[in-house]
Amino acid sequence: MWKKINRFILIILIAVFGYLLLSFHVVYFGNAIKILKKTRLNSEYTFVYVKGLPAESILKIDTLREAGIGDVLVDMGKLDKEVKDILEKEFESDAVYY
């Protein structure tokens, strides 16, 4: 009986871990790790290493931009609010999905 309960608990823990992986972006900036809620469940850009990348390259990724990476970049001081708004409008009008 305990064997079945333990197996059931293990399956539940694996399912919860999988759900969390599909629900959040883990962005590593080199000196900080930020966690962003994904706009939809998927496995795209779950773990992202952006150390040394310019802010424009980071904002070019639609999935991260939709999750709010621009606000994180502004909070960290890597980007100005006005520049963020301009870049977001520019990349939103781009038909290519990165």
Image (cartoon, rainbow, N blue to C red):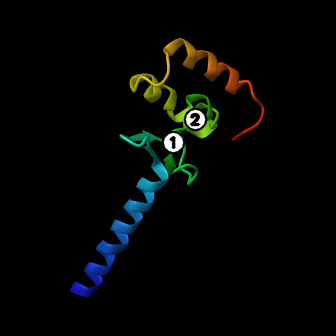
Q: Quadrant of the N terminus?
A: bottom left
- The residue drawn where x is 49% and y is 53% is 22
Q: Position of residue 45 (x, y in %)?
A: 55, 49
CB under 8 Å between callouts 2 and 1?
Answer: yes
- Report the Cα–Cα distance between label 2 and label 1: 7 Å
Image: 64 above or below 45: above
Q: Circle 2: is it few (<14), some (14-19), or many (20+) Cα within 10 Å?
A: some
- The residue drawn where x is 72% and y is 39% is 97
Q: Which residue position holds label 1?
A: 50
- The residue drawn where x is 42% and y is 22% is 77
Amino acid type assigned to the residue bearing label 2 in the image: Ile
Left or right of residue 72, residue 82 in this image = right
- For this rendering, which residue is in front, 8 or 21? 21
Image: 79 above or below 34: above
Q: Position of residue 6 (x, y in %)?
A: 26, 79
Q: Circle 1: is it few (<14), some (14-19), or many (20+) Cα within 10 Å?
A: some
Image: 54 above or below 85: below
Amino acid type assigned to the residue bearing label 1 in the image: Val
Number of numbered discs: 2
Q: Which residue position holds label 2?
A: 58
Instruction: Residue 77: tell me if it is visible.
Output: yes
Q: Quadrant of the C terminus?
A: top right
- For this rendering, which residue is in front, 81 or 68? 81
Query: Which callout, 2 or 1, points at the residue further toward the start of the chain?
Result: 1
